[in-house]
Image: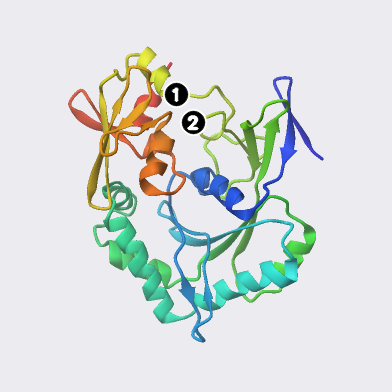
Amino acid sequence: MSILVIDGVRYGEWRPTNEDEFERMVEEHAENIFGEESIYLEKHRLRTKSGIGSIPDGYVTIIGGQAQWHIMEVELSTHPLYEHIVPQISKFINGIKNPSTQRDVVDTLYREIDSDDFLKLRLRKAMRTTETYKFLSDLISEPPVVTIIIEKCTEQLHEALSALAHPRIKVVEFQTFTREGVGLDVHAHLFEPLYKPRQSLTMGSITSTEGEGRRGKIEKRVTLQDLVDAKLINPGQKIFRNYTDKRYEAEITAASKLKLLHDDTIWNSLSEAAQHITGTAINGWIWWYTLKDGQECLMDDLRKKLP
């Protein structure tokens, strides 16, 4: 079993006990895997012409540079290769060839993006177009990249996938290491991203998850308390986000936590509060907005101002 040593501290390799647990981790770091110019959307059903249904674990649309889209499948190496993994990927490949399936995917992606002002703004800035539906239709008419994310990759997996009739299949090995004596509360991920990071690391990309640390490198966790201490935000300040045609607001408490105003629940972090609303793992720093000097800004923009 592999051991990771960070500044003299030992981390042991950790394996997920089930696919749902692993899938939540991957969703949380989708932007680290696919890049800052990616848009991740959760599951939606695909169907082949024969009616055989299959559900990929997510869709990723790359809107920067040469636009492309990915069908993402999260797998465990313990799953049978030829009885489970290969047939699952084959269903996706067959399903996306169906024109009605392609229209269904376009409609679904369009609804998701059109209901989220932040996603619409990102798409328009990147593609310099307001014709979202046409952009998605043109994109989905092209074959997607089928991306398999697995905690342990093998040569047998590559050989099996190479026999499938699809031109673009990628595999990402996504390893997790937990701090010895602490467990999953302090952990790091090791993987090779599918884009070129602004600052390359010699071992692919290592993301520390001791809370909501910055992307792409191991460093001290950044918390709301850090922003309060730096006077970038203040207790009582409101943060907000429009989601599915509804405005959600939260208040920074005196203890530097978040109180959601629609249900009075208290949360430790931006991501926890966002996940409570959306029902999916999400990076709260790039989800929540606030007002700074009379202007709307992402909480991530304030985080970047920390010394």
With 236 as the anchor, is 166 left or right in this view?
right
Place of residue 232 in the rendered image (x, y in percent of width and height, measured from the top left): 32, 18
Instruction: Name the element at disc 1.
Output: loop
Between residues 13 and 21, which one lies in front from this camera angle?
A: 21
Between residues 188 and 268, which one lies in front from this camera angle?
A: 268
Q: CB under 8 Å between callouts 2 and 1?
A: yes
Between residues 241 and 117, which one lies in front from this camera angle?
A: 241
- Residue where numbered disc 1 is placed: 223
Does residue 220 sit above or below 275 in this rendering? Answer: above
Picture residue at 30% right of the left edge, 48% below the top: 125
Picture residue at 29% right of the left edge, 18% below the top: 235
Indicate the quadrant containing the N terminus: top left, top right, bottom left or bottom right: top right
* Quarter where residue 229 is shown: top left
* Quarter where residue 103 is shown: bottom left
Q: Residue furthest bottom?
A: 50
Number of numbered labels in the structure image:
2
